[in-house]
Image: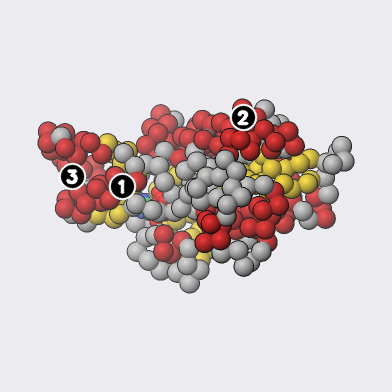
Amino acid sequence: MSNNKLNIGLVFGGNSNEHEVSIQSAKTIYNALSHSDNKSFVVIPIYINKYGFWEDSEYSKSILFEDNKTTSMIENNTNSINNLSNLPKAIETIDVWFPALHGPNGEDGVIQGLFKLSGKPFVGSGLLGSSLAMDKIAMKSILKSYNLPQVPYIYLNKEDLLDKLFMQSFFRKIIKVINYPCFVKPANLGSSIGITKAYSKEELINGIKFASIYDERIIIEKNIEGRELECGVLGKSIMRSSVVGEVKFQTDWYTYESKYNQNLSSSIIPAELGSDISNKIQKLAISACKSINAYGLARVDFFFQEDTQQIYINEVNTLPGFTKTSMYPMLWEASGLKLEKLVASLIEIAKE
Ligand SMILES: Nc1ncnc2c1ncn2[C@@H]1O[C@H](COP(=O)(O)OP(=O)(O)O)[C@@H](O)[C@H]1O
Ligand SMILES: [Mg+2]
Protein backbone atom coordinates (compact mmCIF):
# COMPACT_ATOMS: atom_id res chain seq x y z
CA MET A 1 0.00 0.00 0.00
CA SER A 2 1.16 3.51 -0.69
CA ASN A 3 2.58 5.15 2.41
CA ASN A 4 0.07 7.92 2.80
CA LYS A 5 -2.98 5.65 2.48
CA LEU A 6 -4.73 4.48 5.62
CA ASN A 7 -5.87 0.88 5.91
CA ILE A 8 -9.32 0.87 7.45
CA GLY A 9 -10.38 -2.40 9.07
CA LEU A 10 -14.14 -2.46 8.56
CA VAL A 11 -15.46 -5.07 10.98
CA PHE A 12 -19.04 -6.30 10.52
CA GLY A 13 -21.47 -9.18 11.00
CA GLY A 14 -20.95 -10.73 14.40
CA ASN A 15 -22.77 -13.08 16.70
CA SER A 16 -25.72 -10.76 17.31
CA ASN A 17 -29.40 -10.36 16.51
CA GLU A 18 -28.41 -7.39 14.40
CA HIS A 19 -26.13 -9.42 12.11
CA GLU A 20 -28.00 -8.62 8.89
CA VAL A 21 -28.35 -4.92 9.70
CA SER A 22 -24.63 -4.84 10.37
CA ILE A 23 -23.92 -6.19 6.87
CA GLN A 24 -26.09 -3.40 5.42
CA SER A 25 -24.33 -0.79 7.58
CA ALA A 26 -20.94 -2.11 6.44
CA LYS A 27 -21.98 -1.91 2.77
CA THR A 28 -22.91 1.74 3.20
CA ILE A 29 -19.65 2.53 5.03
CA TYR A 30 -17.53 0.55 2.53
CA ASN A 31 -19.02 2.44 -0.42
CA ALA A 32 -18.66 5.81 1.28
CA LEU A 33 -15.01 5.14 2.22
CA SER A 34 -14.26 3.95 -1.32
CA HIS A 35 -15.83 7.05 -2.90
CA SER A 36 -13.57 9.16 -5.09
CA ASP A 37 -13.69 11.89 -2.39
CA ASN A 38 -11.92 9.49 -0.04
CA LYS A 39 -8.82 8.51 -2.00
CA SER A 40 -6.66 8.19 1.09
CA PHE A 41 -8.44 5.13 2.45
CA VAL A 42 -8.03 1.47 1.60
CA VAL A 43 -10.89 -0.53 3.09
CA ILE A 44 -10.17 -4.00 4.43
CA PRO A 45 -13.49 -5.68 5.15
CA ILE A 46 -13.46 -8.15 8.04
CA TYR A 47 -16.57 -10.24 8.39
CA ILE A 48 -17.32 -12.01 11.67
CA ASN A 49 -19.76 -14.81 10.98
CA LYS A 50 -22.72 -15.79 13.14
CA TYR A 51 -20.50 -18.15 15.15
CA GLY A 52 -18.02 -15.41 15.97
CA PHE A 53 -15.31 -16.44 13.49
CA TRP A 54 -13.31 -13.77 11.69
CA GLU A 55 -13.02 -14.22 7.92
CA ASP A 56 -10.29 -13.10 5.54
CA SER A 57 -10.85 -9.95 3.53
CA GLU A 58 -11.61 -11.66 0.24
CA TYR A 59 -14.41 -13.75 1.69
CA SER A 60 -15.57 -10.75 3.72
CA LYS A 61 -15.85 -8.67 0.59
CA SER A 62 -17.96 -11.33 -1.08
CA ILE A 63 -20.43 -11.13 1.83
CA LEU A 64 -20.80 -7.44 1.14
CA PHE A 65 -21.16 -7.58 -2.62
CA GLU A 66 -22.37 -11.00 -3.76
CA ASP A 67 -26.13 -10.90 -3.43
CA ASN A 68 -26.47 -14.64 -3.91
CA LYS A 69 -24.55 -15.36 -0.70
CA THR A 70 -27.41 -16.54 1.45
CA THR A 71 -27.36 -16.82 5.20
CA SER A 72 -27.12 -20.61 5.02
CA MET A 73 -24.01 -20.37 2.81
CA ILE A 74 -22.56 -17.95 5.30
CA GLU A 75 -23.20 -20.37 8.15
CA ASN A 76 -21.86 -23.38 6.28
CA ASN A 77 -18.65 -21.74 5.20
CA THR A 78 -15.76 -23.87 6.36
CA ASN A 79 -13.00 -21.34 5.71
CA SER A 80 -13.74 -19.76 9.07
CA ILE A 81 -10.68 -18.81 11.01
CA ASN A 82 -10.81 -18.67 14.76
CA ASN A 83 -10.76 -15.00 15.71
CA LEU A 84 -7.73 -15.09 17.99
CA SER A 85 -5.55 -17.04 15.57
CA ASN A 86 -6.48 -14.61 12.82
CA LEU A 87 -5.85 -11.48 14.84
CA PRO A 88 -2.08 -10.90 14.55
CA LYS A 89 -2.24 -10.71 10.75
CA ALA A 90 -5.06 -8.19 10.85
CA ILE A 91 -3.34 -6.03 13.46
CA GLU A 92 -0.22 -5.62 11.32
CA THR A 93 -2.04 -4.18 8.34
CA ILE A 94 -4.77 -2.08 9.90
CA ASP A 95 -4.27 1.59 10.73
CA VAL A 96 -7.76 2.39 12.01
CA TRP A 97 -10.58 0.04 13.03
CA PHE A 98 -14.10 0.90 11.93
CA PRO A 99 -16.67 -1.28 13.71
CA ALA A 100 -19.96 -1.59 11.82
CA LEU A 101 -21.34 -3.89 14.48
CA HIS A 102 -24.50 -3.50 16.52
CA GLY A 103 -25.57 -4.97 19.85
CA PRO A 104 -23.77 -7.33 22.24
CA ASN A 105 -20.05 -8.01 21.53
CA GLY A 106 -19.87 -5.20 18.95
CA GLU A 107 -21.34 -2.19 20.68
CA ASP A 108 -20.83 -3.00 24.35
CA GLY A 109 -17.08 -2.56 24.84
CA VAL A 110 -16.02 -6.15 24.17
CA ILE A 111 -14.52 -5.59 20.74
CA GLN A 112 -13.42 -2.09 21.75
CA GLY A 113 -11.17 -3.76 24.34
CA LEU A 114 -9.63 -5.86 21.59
CA PHE A 115 -9.10 -2.80 19.39
CA LYS A 116 -7.43 -1.05 22.28
CA LEU A 117 -5.08 -3.98 22.84
CA SER A 118 -4.16 -3.88 19.16
CA GLY A 119 -2.74 -0.42 19.76
CA LYS A 120 -4.59 1.05 16.77
CA PRO A 121 -7.24 3.78 16.96
CA PHE A 122 -10.86 2.91 16.35
CA VAL A 123 -14.04 4.70 15.37
CA GLY A 124 -16.53 5.39 18.16
CA SER A 125 -16.59 5.17 21.94
CA GLY A 126 -14.04 3.34 24.05
CA LEU A 127 -14.73 0.57 26.50
CA LEU A 128 -16.35 2.57 29.25
CA GLY A 129 -18.80 4.57 27.15
CA SER A 130 -19.72 1.54 25.05
CA SER A 131 -20.50 -0.68 27.99
CA LEU A 132 -22.30 2.03 29.96
CA ALA A 133 -24.49 2.83 26.96
CA MET A 134 -25.31 -0.82 26.41
CA ASP A 135 -26.46 -1.47 29.98
CA LYS A 136 -29.67 0.46 30.52
CA ILE A 137 -29.38 0.24 34.33
CA ALA A 138 -25.78 1.46 34.42
CA MET A 139 -26.55 4.24 31.93
CA LYS A 140 -29.53 5.45 33.91
CA SER A 141 -27.66 5.57 37.20
CA ILE A 142 -25.04 7.80 35.59
CA LEU A 143 -27.69 10.04 33.97
CA LYS A 144 -29.31 10.30 37.41
CA SER A 145 -26.04 11.38 39.04
CA TYR A 146 -25.78 14.15 36.42
CA ASN A 147 -29.40 15.18 36.99
CA LEU A 148 -30.25 14.55 33.36
CA PRO A 149 -33.96 14.10 32.61
CA GLN A 150 -35.10 10.52 32.21
CA VAL A 151 -38.09 8.27 32.76
CA PRO A 152 -38.65 6.92 36.34
CA TYR A 153 -37.36 3.35 36.59
CA ILE A 154 -36.62 0.50 38.95
CA TYR A 155 -34.59 -2.61 38.38
CA LEU A 156 -34.10 -6.11 39.64
CA ASN A 157 -32.12 -9.26 39.04
CA LYS A 158 -33.57 -12.47 37.66
CA GLU A 159 -33.04 -14.31 40.97
CA ASP A 160 -34.96 -11.62 42.91
CA LEU A 161 -38.11 -13.21 41.45
CA LEU A 162 -37.65 -16.06 43.94
CA ASP A 163 -37.36 -13.72 46.94
CA LYS A 164 -40.89 -13.25 48.30
CA LEU A 165 -40.10 -10.32 50.59
CA PHE A 166 -38.15 -8.52 47.90
CA MET A 167 -40.97 -8.98 45.41
CA GLN A 168 -43.59 -7.64 47.84
CA SER A 169 -41.69 -4.42 48.30
CA PHE A 170 -40.91 -4.35 44.55
CA PHE A 171 -44.62 -4.43 43.62
CA ARG A 172 -45.37 -1.71 46.19
CA LYS A 173 -42.71 0.44 44.51
CA ILE A 174 -44.16 -0.33 41.09
CA ILE A 175 -47.53 1.06 42.18
CA LYS A 176 -45.90 4.08 43.83
CA VAL A 177 -43.43 5.24 41.19
CA ILE A 178 -44.16 3.42 37.92
CA ASN A 179 -47.74 2.13 37.78
CA TYR A 180 -49.32 0.42 34.74
CA PRO A 181 -48.80 0.17 31.86
CA CYS A 182 -45.03 -0.06 32.23
CA PHE A 183 -42.12 -1.18 30.09
CA VAL A 184 -40.06 -4.24 31.06
CA LYS A 185 -36.66 -4.58 29.38
CA PRO A 186 -33.56 -6.71 29.52
CA ALA A 187 -30.78 -4.29 30.55
CA ASN A 188 -28.38 -5.28 27.76
CA LEU A 189 -29.92 -5.61 24.33
CA GLY A 190 -31.31 -3.59 21.47
CA SER A 191 -33.76 -3.64 18.56
CA SER A 192 -36.62 -3.88 21.09
CA ILE A 193 -35.88 -7.57 21.67
CA GLY A 194 -37.09 -8.94 25.01
CA ILE A 195 -39.19 -5.84 25.77
CA THR A 196 -42.83 -6.01 26.92
CA LYS A 197 -45.41 -3.36 27.66
CA ALA A 198 -47.19 -4.68 30.75
CA TYR A 199 -50.71 -3.57 31.66
CA SER A 200 -51.10 -5.52 34.93
CA LYS A 201 -49.14 -7.21 37.71
CA GLU A 202 -49.57 -10.54 35.93
CA GLU A 203 -48.23 -9.15 32.65
CA LEU A 204 -45.38 -7.54 34.54
CA ILE A 205 -44.38 -10.90 36.06
CA ASN A 206 -44.55 -12.52 32.62
CA GLY A 207 -42.59 -9.61 31.16
CA ILE A 208 -39.85 -10.03 33.77
CA LYS A 209 -39.67 -13.75 32.99
CA PHE A 210 -39.48 -12.99 29.27
CA ALA A 211 -36.77 -10.34 29.71
CA SER A 212 -34.80 -12.73 31.92
CA ILE A 213 -34.37 -15.07 28.95
CA TYR A 214 -32.05 -12.41 27.55
CA ASP A 215 -30.44 -10.90 30.63
CA GLU A 216 -30.12 -11.37 34.38
CA ARG A 217 -30.53 -7.61 34.82
CA ILE A 218 -34.02 -6.26 34.17
CA ILE A 219 -35.33 -2.72 34.16
CA ILE A 220 -38.92 -1.49 34.52
CA GLU A 221 -39.91 1.97 33.35
CA LYS A 222 -42.90 4.22 33.62
CA ASN A 223 -44.81 4.43 30.33
CA ILE A 224 -44.40 7.76 28.57
CA GLU A 225 -47.00 8.83 26.04
CA GLY A 226 -45.00 10.99 23.74
CA ARG A 227 -43.15 11.53 20.50
CA GLU A 228 -39.87 9.69 19.83
CA LEU A 229 -37.03 11.96 18.77
CA GLU A 230 -33.44 11.14 17.86
CA CYS A 231 -30.32 13.27 17.63
CA GLY A 232 -26.88 12.47 16.22
CA VAL A 233 -23.65 13.31 18.05
CA LEU A 234 -20.25 13.53 16.35
CA GLY A 235 -16.83 14.35 17.81
CA LYS A 236 -14.47 13.76 20.70
CA SER A 237 -12.70 16.88 21.98
CA ILE A 238 -15.39 18.99 20.34
CA MET A 239 -18.82 17.41 20.08
CA ARG A 240 -21.48 18.52 17.65
CA SER A 241 -25.09 17.50 17.44
CA SER A 242 -27.16 17.05 14.31
CA VAL A 243 -30.65 18.27 13.58
CA VAL A 244 -33.35 16.35 15.48
CA GLY A 245 -35.36 13.64 13.74
CA GLU A 246 -38.58 11.90 14.66
CA VAL A 247 -39.61 8.27 14.23
CA LYS A 248 -43.23 7.36 13.57
CA PHE A 249 -44.63 3.83 13.62
CA GLN A 250 -47.88 2.00 13.06
CA THR A 251 -47.47 -0.27 16.10
CA ASP A 252 -48.43 0.72 19.66
CA TRP A 253 -44.75 1.23 20.46
CA TYR A 254 -41.54 0.99 18.40
CA THR A 255 -41.27 -2.80 18.29
CA TYR A 256 -38.78 -5.08 16.49
CA GLU A 257 -41.47 -5.55 13.84
CA SER A 258 -41.93 -1.85 13.11
CA LYS A 259 -38.20 -1.08 13.35
CA TYR A 260 -37.33 -3.42 10.49
CA ASN A 261 -40.42 -3.12 8.31
CA GLN A 262 -40.36 0.05 6.27
CA ASN A 263 -44.12 -0.14 5.79
CA LEU A 264 -44.62 0.12 9.52
CA SER A 265 -42.27 2.97 10.35
CA SER A 266 -40.88 6.16 8.90
CA SER A 267 -38.70 9.06 9.87
CA ILE A 268 -39.23 12.79 9.66
CA ILE A 269 -36.06 14.88 9.36
CA PRO A 270 -35.95 17.43 10.76
CA ALA A 271 -38.74 16.83 13.25
CA GLU A 272 -41.40 19.51 13.48
CA LEU A 273 -40.40 21.19 16.73
CA GLY A 274 -40.00 24.65 18.16
CA SER A 275 -36.37 25.77 18.07
CA ASP A 276 -36.27 25.92 21.89
CA ILE A 277 -37.11 22.23 22.17
CA SER A 278 -34.74 21.13 19.42
CA ASN A 279 -31.94 23.25 20.95
CA LYS A 280 -32.56 21.62 24.32
CA ILE A 281 -32.47 18.17 22.76
CA GLN A 282 -29.23 18.92 20.91
CA LYS A 283 -27.60 20.07 24.15
CA LEU A 284 -28.96 17.12 26.13
CA ALA A 285 -27.65 14.70 23.49
CA ILE A 286 -24.11 15.97 24.07
CA SER A 287 -24.53 16.05 27.87
CA ALA A 288 -25.79 12.46 27.83
CA CYS A 289 -22.74 11.34 25.82
CA LYS A 290 -20.33 13.23 28.03
CA SER A 291 -21.86 11.82 31.22
CA ILE A 292 -21.18 8.22 30.18
CA ASN A 293 -17.96 8.98 28.28
CA ALA A 294 -19.42 8.14 24.86
CA TYR A 295 -17.76 9.89 21.92
CA GLY A 296 -16.92 9.63 18.25
CA LEU A 297 -20.43 8.89 17.15
CA ALA A 298 -23.69 8.27 18.96
CA ARG A 299 -27.39 8.55 18.40
CA VAL A 300 -29.27 9.74 21.44
CA ASP A 301 -32.97 8.86 21.62
CA PHE A 302 -35.59 10.88 23.46
CA PHE A 303 -39.26 10.93 24.43
CA PHE A 304 -41.00 14.28 24.17
CA GLN A 305 -44.30 14.79 25.96
CA GLU A 306 -46.05 17.61 24.21
CA ASP A 307 -48.64 18.60 26.85
CA THR A 308 -46.03 19.00 29.59
CA GLN A 309 -43.17 19.97 27.19
CA GLN A 310 -41.08 17.45 29.13
CA ILE A 311 -38.06 15.89 27.39
CA TYR A 312 -36.71 12.52 28.59
CA ILE A 313 -33.47 10.90 27.49
CA ASN A 314 -34.31 7.31 26.56
CA GLU A 315 -30.97 5.88 25.51
CA VAL A 316 -27.59 6.41 23.90
CA ASN A 317 -26.66 4.15 20.98
CA THR A 318 -22.89 4.16 20.48
CA LEU A 319 -22.93 2.28 17.15
CA PRO A 320 -26.23 3.29 15.59
CA GLY A 321 -27.54 1.75 12.36
CA PHE A 322 -25.57 3.03 9.39
CA THR A 323 -27.53 1.84 6.37
CA LYS A 324 -28.58 4.28 3.66
CA THR A 325 -31.96 4.66 5.32
CA SER A 326 -30.69 4.76 8.91
CA MET A 327 -31.43 7.75 11.07
CA TYR A 328 -27.80 8.59 11.99
CA PRO A 329 -26.40 9.20 8.48
CA MET A 330 -29.67 10.84 7.41
CA LEU A 331 -29.56 13.25 10.37
CA TRP A 332 -26.05 14.32 9.36
CA GLU A 333 -26.96 14.61 5.70
CA ALA A 334 -29.76 16.97 6.76
CA SER A 335 -27.24 18.87 8.87
CA GLY A 336 -25.04 19.44 5.83
CA LEU A 337 -22.59 16.58 6.24
CA LYS A 338 -22.68 14.14 3.36
CA LEU A 339 -22.09 10.44 3.97
CA GLU A 340 -18.58 10.44 2.39
CA LYS A 341 -17.55 13.36 4.61
CA LEU A 342 -19.19 11.80 7.65
CA VAL A 343 -17.20 8.55 7.42
CA ALA A 344 -13.97 10.48 6.78
CA SER A 345 -14.67 12.68 9.85
CA LEU A 346 -15.26 9.59 11.97
CA ILE A 347 -11.79 8.33 11.03
CA GLU A 348 -10.22 11.73 11.72
CA ILE A 349 -11.91 11.79 15.13
CA ALA A 350 -10.70 8.24 15.89
CA LYS A 351 -7.11 9.41 15.31
CA GLU A 352 -7.41 12.38 17.72
N1 LIG B 1 -40.66 4.22 29.15
C1 LIG B 1 -41.19 4.08 27.94
N2 LIG B 1 -42.34 4.71 27.61
C2 LIG B 1 -42.90 4.56 26.39
N3 LIG B 1 -42.37 3.81 25.42
C3 LIG B 1 -41.23 3.16 25.69
C4 LIG B 1 -40.58 3.27 26.95
N4 LIG B 1 -39.45 2.52 26.92
C5 LIG B 1 -39.41 1.97 25.70
N5 LIG B 1 -40.46 2.32 24.96
C6 LIG B 1 -40.74 1.88 23.59
O1 LIG B 1 -39.93 0.76 23.30
C7 LIG B 1 -38.98 1.06 22.28
C8 LIG B 1 -37.67 0.34 22.54
O2 LIG B 1 -37.17 0.72 23.80
P1 LIG B 1 -35.66 1.09 24.01
O3 LIG B 1 -35.46 1.35 25.45
O4 LIG B 1 -35.28 2.16 23.08
O5 LIG B 1 -34.93 -0.30 23.67
P2 LIG B 1 -33.92 -0.72 22.50
O6 LIG B 1 -32.57 -0.54 23.11
O7 LIG B 1 -34.25 -2.15 22.25
O8 LIG B 1 -34.15 0.20 21.33
C9 LIG B 1 -38.88 2.58 22.29
O9 LIG B 1 -38.43 3.07 21.05
C10 LIG B 1 -40.33 2.95 22.60
O10 LIG B 1 -41.17 2.85 21.47
MG1 LIG C 1 -34.23 2.26 21.26
- Residue at 61%, 27% (x, y): give it: 117
Q: CA distance from mark 2 to mark 1?
A: 31 Å
As drawn, the residue found furthest toward the front would be: 78
In this picture, is 293 found above or below 274? above
**Callout 1: SS:** helix
Which residue position is annotated with label 2? 116
**Callout 2: SS:** helix
Q: Is residue 348 rendered to the left or right of residue 330?
A: right
Q: Nearer the viewer, residue 37 or 62?
A: 62
Quarter of the picture holding the N terminus: top right
Which residue position is annotated with label 3? 175
**Callout 3: SS:** helix
Which residue position is annotated with label 1? 213
Q: Amino acid at mark 1?
A: Ile
Which of the two labelled residues, at mark 2 and mark 1, occupies the earlier sequence position? 2
- Residue at 41%, 46% (x, y): give it: 189
